[in-house]
Image (tube, grey):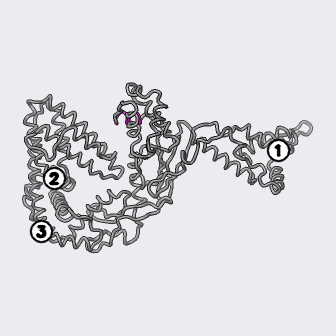
Amino acid sequence: YEQITLFGLIVVGRRPVHYGPIDPVVSRELFIREGLVRGEIQSRAKCLTANQKLLEQLDELEAKARRRDILADEETLYAFYDARLPAEIHQTATFDSWYKVNSQKDPQLLIMREEDVLAREASEVTAAHYPDTLHLGDLALALSYHFEPNHPRDGVTLRVPAPLLPALPAERLEWLVPGLIEAKCIALVRNLPKALRKNFVPVPDFVKAALQRIEFGQGSLPQALGRELLRMTGARVSDEAWAEAAQQVENHLKMNLEVVDGQGKFLGEGRDLAELTARFAEASQAALAVPQTAKSQQPVEAKVFAAVAEKTQQNIAGLSMTVYPALVEENGTVKEGRFSTAAEAEFQHRRALQRLLMQQLAEPAKFLRGKLPGLTELGLMYRELGRIDALVEDILLASLDTCVLEGEDSLPRDGAGLAALAERKRGSWTEHAERLARLTLEVLKLWHGLQKRFKGKIDLAQAVALNDIKLQLSNLVYPGFVRETPAQWFKELPRFLKAIELRLEKLPSQVQKDRVWSSELGGLWAQYQNRLNKHTQEGKRDPQLELYRWWLEEYRVSLFAQQLGTKVPISDKRLSKQWSQVEP
């Protein structure tokens, strides 16, 4: 800056002046260091764009390799420009003029090559080890890398449209990318309890040997690693120990998921697939929603609904995704929806067809609503749970499922198919509905009798058992239980309730034994409930988990009322084996 005075009077106090002519040496250094190396100038010179692109590529190499020794430092970049730039250039205008003329003679003028800016060769960073996409079926999802400890995106990030979250294989995400798998496995083993970890020392050597025999991306990473370590040492690591070790792994060794909506707009990110699936469930359904037209907003009618495809392609966030159309029941009306998993689509379609069959068979439905056996008693027994008309509706819908839909190789997907099926089986519906109503009354009578046992003074010694029984009952008989309980298990409810009666009769003489069993059953139920919640968030429908849930009831019968017998041979070992069949 300069100051101008006239006879000691300040005329201009602070005016910027060009520093180049004042100190051309320092000005040139500043121009190169701040302008060219750090990109602080506005210039259209193609060398600066090309060099910036090269540096970004090399910066990504460092992010992938998680090292800061690949790209040369600023002094090397400064030296590159210093050696090639004329001494008189120290401002943008002069630089642009000089470059425009001379780059016509030499198109590669001031354009850096990799060897100019690499501090070392990065041969370990290959496309195979650090891919830019993750292939899941026909989809290719973008991967990006970031190296900044404690940053939310540190590590590898997968860009995922919200509707694809439920279909993402959680086990595949454990493997990250080939270039990071060794570091992750070392971290997993080092996080094991010392008593286990000492079998695998030195850890890097054991991990390297194990990985040579493991096929990348197949199954569960901890289980695959555990099998090889067991083969090498004879030391077995339990699933629980691996799970605890995985929780302690640093964030950059867990896949980060960037979630986007149907248009590719950023919604959020995180490393917990189940939590993200739950958080963006609404966004997922919004992206899958059938395009709104006057026709699509009309409720689906039983006799006239058009064919619903089993699967179709939909463009979501620039990806052509396979989605599964199905009919959906909402508050008693049916409309068309789309789902990211075939299992969820099948479940929703079946429930919607039950509702449409009520429309298709309106006359017999009207008759049954007033003529079901035991209506008065049903109303009395159910009044603590809800209204009799809701119970009757559930009985009719559930009986339609067992009478009409059960046993069909494939569910009807158009009005004509549904009408033909309803006509073929309508003759036996009344019998099914009446049988289910009588069974429901039997269940409610047993349930009502058990409820009386909880009234009055409670023996504190029996409190643990009584709390366990109350929880069990609340998951057997509740508003809507007739329709929600699978038909093959609904008929077993009287036996399960009678087993509770026998348990209560024996309780005073075996309080301590009952307390031990209650503790075991509480843990098994919590395990089931946690997995069910996870599956619900992910849109999974696992028949093995449903079977496990009802085997828990059979296990209770085997503990407390052996004389009633069980539907299947059951024991804690059989339960554990069944749990191993459940989807993660």
Q: Pointer 2: what residue?
A: 490
Numbered range of the magenta stretch:
239-246
Position above or below: 247 against 497: above
- What's the mark number on residue 287? none
Q: Mark 3 and mark 1: span between their CA atoms?
A: 96 Å
Q: Amino acid at mark 2?
A: Phe
Q: Earlier in the sequence, mark 1 or mark 2?
A: 1
Left or right of residue 270, residue 58 in this image: right
- What's the mark number on residue 367? 3
Q: Which SS type dominates the magenta stretch?
A: helix
Q: Residue at x 31, y 42 (%)?
A: 530
CB under 8 Å between discs 3 and 2: no
Instruction: Tell me the quarter of the image containing the N terminus.
Output: top right
Instruction: Tell me the quarter of the image containing the C terminus.
Output: top left
Q: Mark 3 and mark 2: span between their CA atoms?
A: 24 Å
Position above or below: 180 against 135: above
Q: Amino acid at mark 3?
A: Phe
- Foreground pick, 201 / 335: 201
CB under 8 Å between discs 1 and 2: no
**Secondary structure category for the residue under label 1:** loop
Q: Pointer 1: what residue?
A: 90
Indicate which label's residue lies in the foreground, 1 or 2: 2
Q: Earlier in the sequence, mark 3 or mark 1?
A: 1
Query: Magenta includes 559?
Result: no
> In the picture, residue 522 is in which quadrant?
top left
